[in-house]
Image (cartoon, helix red, strand yellow):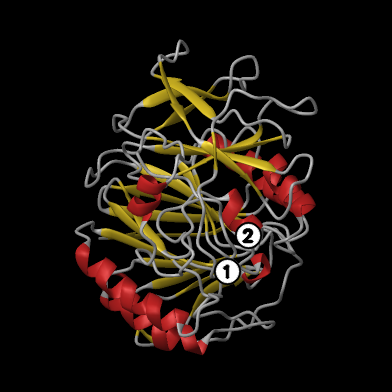
Amino acid sequence: MLLLPALLAGCHTLEKIAEDSAVTAGACGDPILVPLSAFDTDPAVPADPDEPTFGSTRPDPFQVHLSWVHEPSTSMAMVWRTDADTRASRVQYGTDSSYGSEVSGASFFAIEDTEFGRIHEAHVCGLSPGTTYHYRVGGEGHWSEGRTFTTAPAPGTPARFRFLVAGDSRDNQAVWGQILAAAEPMAPDFYMFSGDAVDLGTNMDEWDAWYQNGEGYLDRRPLMLAHGNHEFNVQPFYALVAHPGNEQWFSFDYAHAHFVVLNDTVAVTDGRTIQAQWMEQDLAATTQPWRFAFHHIPAYSSCTTHGSEPDLQEKWSPVEEAGGVAVDFAGHNHNYERSVPLRGGAEVPATEGTTYVVSAGAGADLYGNDRSQPFTATATVDHNFVLVEVDGGTLTLTAYDLVGNVLDSFTTTR
């Protein structure tokens, strides 16, 4: 959780923290800070360094999950929980189950010092692209079970890969577990979630249920989680995810694809405008042919509860469309829908515009659709998830319901 106290990445000098504190850095050389809410203006402080101490209640790691803070082809971030008194925050890893390498992380509390509130985080760097690693977390005598993960292909590699898209479980996290189980035979390489994992961001019981339903999946494949309006920009959200930069808006590459993740319920004044400016520069800098945007509130939607978001159509859509974003993924409107390819609100050939997809069916109560909207290609009221396969210059997007029925499928090229 490299959440900075200011909302713009770079407004806080991480190098200064590393020089002035005794924080234990992982193999990536970055300090791990105690995460703040997005409203907090206090300076971020170093997390508690790794120590070989264990509590008596639940010292063994649980809710282990993976994500990326650094380059996905050469790194991995691990987050897990223990009881309050356990300070061991280590990762052992290697290309077989004998491991052979070890790094130290750090730990902190979410909201308050509760019995099971200690969260641990560690970053591993210097890995080889496209390689499967074995790992375990914890400390001597209290290691987790052994697990594996696979690093991304080297950036720019036109490799075939798959990722899962879902959003909006809210207070029905069991459906999130059903989605992960249903998608398992499809072998996604990583997961993207468009926000509203829980109904109330400060409710640790809901976060417990969400990550418990992810056990066996999120500890083997990375998850990148966009902020939703029901996360409320509170500390537990930023404590339980490990993302790049300020953790609110950031980008990363996977093979020959570039992913932009945004926060459309940002706490800072003019936050959407700030992100539009940042995104314009970010998209201009990438050379990857496939470009995707992820956030929570859809710019274009036929949903009868919320509908489209004109402010995002004005601020973000022109940047995405000019920057070559193939698909914009959002949640918020509890259904599945896909637009025709758009540029400036008008339909264009798929290679010349952005397709807007809403997948917000991971458990929340479903909303209706007005399919007569001129931008709507298809829409359906079902709990759902999306599997995206990128194979060289071809993308195939398939939406499924919870029992594997195909709700929608389309193919485009770049």
Q: Is residue 40 above or below residue 313?
A: above
Q: Secondary structure at mark 2?
A: helix
Q: Is residue 288 left or right of residue 217?
A: left
Between 87 and 185, the one nearer to me in the picture: 87
Between the C-alphas of marks 1 and 2, the distance is 9 Å
Residue 342 appears in view: no
Residue 318 lies left or right of residue 41; in this view the side is left
Q: Give the answer, above or below, for where 243 lies relative to 79.
A: below
Q: Secondary structure at mark 1?
A: loop
User: Could one spot residue 14 in this view of the protein?
Assistant: yes
N-term-proximal mark, 1 vs 2: 1
Q: Residue 25 versus residue 333: which sits nearer the camera?
A: 25
Q: Could you say which quadrant of the image residue 99 lies in? A: top left
Q: Quadrant of the C terminus?
A: bottom left
Asked if the residue under mark 2 is in contact with the one under mark 1, i.e. CB atoms within 8 Å, the reply is yes
Q: Residue at x 63, y 59 (%)?
A: 235
Direction from residue 2 to residue 341 in the image, left or right: left
Q: Amino acid at mark 1?
A: Asp
Mark 2 neighbour class, 10 Å CA radius: few under 14, some 14 to 19, many 20 or more: many
Q: Looking at the picture, how far across and down is residue 172, in whole percent? A: 77, 56
The residue carrying mark 1 is 40
The image position of residue 162, as x and y in percent, is 42, 45
Q: How far across and how far down the image is residue 395, in percent?
A: 35, 54
**What residue is drawn where x is 58% and y is 86%?**
372
Looking at the rendered structure, the kind of residue marked 2 is Gln
- Residue at the spot of label 2: 235
